[in-house]
Image (spheres, rainbow, N blue to C red):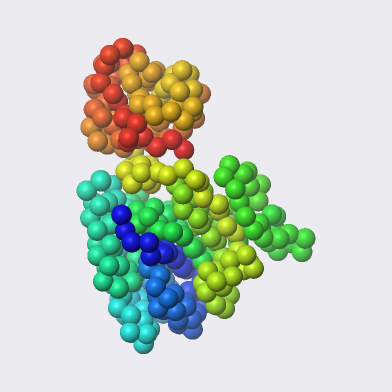
Amino acid sequence: MRQQTMRIAIKVGSNVLAREDGTLDITRMSSLVDQIAELHRAGKEIILVSSGAVASGRSEIHPQKKLDSVDQRQLFSAVGQAKLINRYYELFREHHIPVGQVLTTKESYATRRHYLNQKNCMTVMLANGVIPIVNENDTVSVSELMFTDNDELSGLIASMMDVDQLIILSNIDGIYNGDPSAPDTSVIRQIKQGEDISNCIRTSKSGFGRGGMLTKTNIARKVADEGIPVVIANGRCDNILIDLLRNPGKTLCTRFLPSNEPVSSVKKWIAHSEGFAKGEIHINECATQMLNSGKAISILPIGIIRIEGEFEKDDIVRIFNFKGNRIGVGKANCHSMQAKENLGKHGKKVVVHYDYLYIE
């Protein structure tokens, strides 16, 4: 158990840090650093998940020929990440606050051991007064190994580090109840668990980032379901971070209310590991009803109707109900061949133990 110091994960998106021409907005960056420094001095532990490497590199180098999207991202981020972290270093040094760079890839969270190594790294940094600045290592990430965007990464970091709040800063005030450009729409101030807002979400991507409001909403829901409050707010508003924490009820934003049911550290890892799943387990109607009852139920061969794909023991697998809808993810307790051999049989080895099963 960590000490009861408030720990906050702050995600700053590309559309907050980039100017209209795609280059880095140093003035905005400096303002956010000043706010984070103030929170740090007030005793808050801050983890900063920051985009901006590509925007930073775009102003430094001009390719001699047209590059595809992956090559362009790798080139700009390789040059820009050094500039970005150096800029953060200089800005935080003015406040006498040390920072540390954490570059990561999706593969870094594929196994429990790697996940815990990442967690330990940032825990040590925070314990020594260092602000971790986290970003995906775009120089080595390729399409199939990438996070959807830094929203997904920030959700994983918030969950892994057991933060007290995740703040996602974008270039709009929150989630609107309609088209944000329409005069009769407004920001949804609070979203409860299970509340359907699908008709309010635009599927378009952000201008300079890889994600959009749909990704932000999905990540916010998942993290809130794990018991962590999530805020989506406008990072271009002056003093937004200070206002969110000091005047939460008066500051324009969208808040996702957290679940009151605690989720274990292992299940948090599993919840964010769906992208690494190696196979599928389809369960029957009886097993579906038992899982939906909220009881501590493991998945046994007797309740399985179909196994798809191949997986080894300890691999992540997706769980589907009898209607073919995905309902969760889990860690396999045996390999797929053994699971298929025992399909529908009584008294056989558990396929997914409850302790390693996350129902969405």
1 on left or right of 42 = left
Q: Quick check: can you spot residue 29? A: no
Asked if residue 3 is positioned above or below residue 21 in the image, the reply reads above
64 on left or right of 293 = left
Asked if residue 259 is positioned above or below residue 80 in the image, the reply reads above
Task: Say which quadrant the N terminus sits in.
Answer: bottom left
Outermost residue, front direction? 4
> x%, y% of residue 86?
32, 80
Q: How many marks?
A: 0
Asked if residue 281 is positioned above or below residue 191 in the image, the reply reads above
Residue at the image point whose x is 32% and y is 29% from the top: 352
Which of 301 and 255 lies nearest the eye of the viewer?
255
Outermost residue, right direction? 184
Which of 204 and 135 lies nearest the eye of the viewer?
135
Which of 34 and 17 lies nearest the eye of the viewer?
34
Residue at the image point whose x is 36% and y is 79% from the top: 88
245 on left or right of 74 = right
Asked if residue 313 is positioned above or below residue 57 in the image, the reply reads above
> x%, y% of residue 221?
51, 48
Residue at the image point whose x is 50% and y is 55% from the top: 229
> x%, y% of residue 151?
45, 58
Q: Quadrant of residue 349?
A: top left
> x%, y% of residue 322?
47, 22
Q: Quadrant of residue 39?
A: bottom left
Residue at the image point whose x is 30% and y is 73% from the top: 129
Q: Quick check: can you spot residue 267? A: yes
